[in-house]
Image (cartoon, helix red, strand yellow):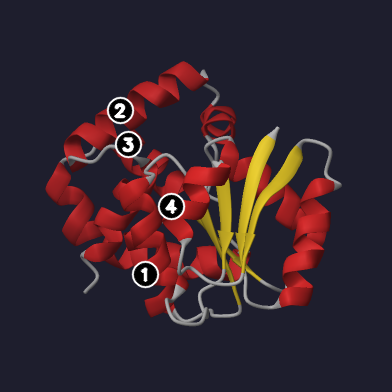
Amino acid sequence: MIKVGIVEDNNTLRKSLTSLFNDAGDMRCVMSLNNLLHIVKEIQKNSPDVILMDIGLPNISGIDGVLTVKAFFPSIQIMMFTVFEDADKIFDAIRNGASGYLLKKTPPLEIVEAVRDLNNGGAPMTASIARKVIQSFHVQQASTVEEYKLTPREKEILRSLVDGASYKKIADQYMVSISTIRTHICSIYNKLHVNSKAEAVAKILKQRQ
């Protein structure tokens, strides 16, 4: 059972999302908040696996909230759920530790599937958001990826990670085992001096500034 937390100040939307997850069969909404003022205490009490978080929240923004959550609970996966499509907010959220980014216009069934994907190690993003990330990554590639001396296959896998692909999808794409992909990803992490997918993507994107 995937334990889901929601941080959304629109009460109607928050209630709809709660029902959506509780009806999914393999999920349960364990935390439903309209702001981030007591987020650490609430997480300690409810222990969500995945948090769906708005950006435009009162008092504390979702972008700042991601940083707080990841500082105290690094294993929790966070997906931004917002109306914002501008590049700065996307990259700030990813740099702060978000592993997924969905727009609020995403159909309900796709939201549920994205939460499953995130919980299984993927990095789901709305297509238009993924394109912005990939475009930025491609601009950076020559000047930043080369610096870390990644092999051609490691570069391809890193692109797939930026694109939000799961380990299984990457393995299927290159017709190798998931174990082989994990070995490549371990090498990528060592060369980038990071410990997670989010950190790897963030390290590349950070150099766009």
Q: Earlier in the sequence, mark 2 or mark 3?
A: 3
Q: Which residue is mark 1?
A: 64
Q: Earlier in the sequence, mark 2 or mark 4?
A: 4
Q: Is residue 121 left or right of residue 186?
A: right
Q: Which numbered tag is attached to residue 154? A: 3
Q: Earlier in the sequence, mark 1 or mark 4?
A: 1
The kind of residue on which mark 1 rests is Asp
Proximity of marks 1 and 4: CB atoms separated by less than 8 Å:
no
Q: Which numbered tag is attached to residue 186? A: 2
Q: Residues within 10 Å of mark 2 (few under 14, many from 20)?
A: some
Q: Earlier in the sequence, mark 3 or mark 1?
A: 1
Give above or below for 57 relative to 51.
below
Task: Name the secondary structure under disc 1.
Answer: helix
Q: In the rendering, at what x and y percent does residue 126 appear?
A: 61, 64
Q: Quadrant of residue 13?
A: bottom right
- The nearer-to-camera label among 2 and 1 is 1
Which residue occupies 26% across, 36% down? 189
Task: Name the secondary structure under disc 2.
Answer: helix
